[in-house]
Image (cartoon, rainbow, N blue to C red):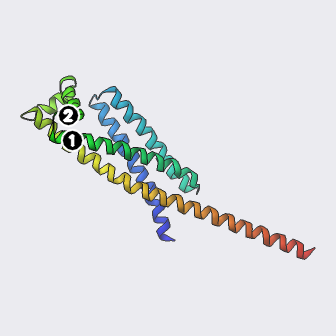
């Protein structure tokens, strides 16, 4: 009833939030003049998230449970990617010798935006620490959204699957009753 409908709405909303967040993130990184490799990875994920949102909207609208499978898979991939990012950024809070900290050092010397941002801090260590804290918190929020989204999308998939099987049972029953009525008339 109402609870099932709410879950389907939430599934579409979460897919939209992840897609919009990914698009905004990509635009920000392009404006910051981020490394081409990093921008390319974010562009790939942005495309996947937009496709995921499309599948969620039309899969639920047309009640095709199979269209929710790519949504679950893409969200799971995003969860893995963000878990890796959070691990790398959180380690950089405590040490300037981690891969992410080294990358931030490299960006400070090779990217004007990061150079100006680092200049607002007294030392390179402070710049790395606070940038890493910000990155950990922001990606951590997305991580929590992804965990919730996987559960909701899976529920949406099961709801649509049940509706599909119930519809098929109803069609089969109608076919049987129509055949019985034809036989009885004969």
Q: Quadrant of residue 126?
A: top left
How crowded pointer 1 is (Cα within 10 Å; few <14, some 14-19, many 20+) is rated as many
Which residue corresponds to the image point at 23% horizontal and 30% vertical from the top-left?
A: 103
Which residue corresponds to the image point at 33% horizontal and 31% vertical from the top-left?
A: 38
Q: In what element is the residue under mark 1?
A: helix
- Figure check: 128 above or below 110: below
Q: Could you give the CA–CA distance between mark 1 and mark 2, rounded to whole angstroms?
A: 9 Å
Which residue corresponds to the image point at 9% horizontal and 35% vertical from the top-left?
A: 121
Nearer to me, 37 or 31:
37
Q: In what element is the residue under mark 2?
A: helix
Residue that lies at the very extreme toward the top in this rendered image: 110
- Figure check: 124 above or below 162: above
Is residue 147 left or right of 1 when viewed as pictured? left
Q: Which numbered disc flags the more N-terminal residue, 1 or 2?
A: 1
Q: Are marks 1 and 2 in contact (CB under 8 Å)?
A: yes
Return the residue at label 2: 101
**Residue 123 location in percent, x, y?**
8, 33
- Figure check: 98 above or below 161: above
Return the residue at label 1: 91
Is residue 124 left or right of 40 when viewed as pictured? left
């Amino acid at each position: 009833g109402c609870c099932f409908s709410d879950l389907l709405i939430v599934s579409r909303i979460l897919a939209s939030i992840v897609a919009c967040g990914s698009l905004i993130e990509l635009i920000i990184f392009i404006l910051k003049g981020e490394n081409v490799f990093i921008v390319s990875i974010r562009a790939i994920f942005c495309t996947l998230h937009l496709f995921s949102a499309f599948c969620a909207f039309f899969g639920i609208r047309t009640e095709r449970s199979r269209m929710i499978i790519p949504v679950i898979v893409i969200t799971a991939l995003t969860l893995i990617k963000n878990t890796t990012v959070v691990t790398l950024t959180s380690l950089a809070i405590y040490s300037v010798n981690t891969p992410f900290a080294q990358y931030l050092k490299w960006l400070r010397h090779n990217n004007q935006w990061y150079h100006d941002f680092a200049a607002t801090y007294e030392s390179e260590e402070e710049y790395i620490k606070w940038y890493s804290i910000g990155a950990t918190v922001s990606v951590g929020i997305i991580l929590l959204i992804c965990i919730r989204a996987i559960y909701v999308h899976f529920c949406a998939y099961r709801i649509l699957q049940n509706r599909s099987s119930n519809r098929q049972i109803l069609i089969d029953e109608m076919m049987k009753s129509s055949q019985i009525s034809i036989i009885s008339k004969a």
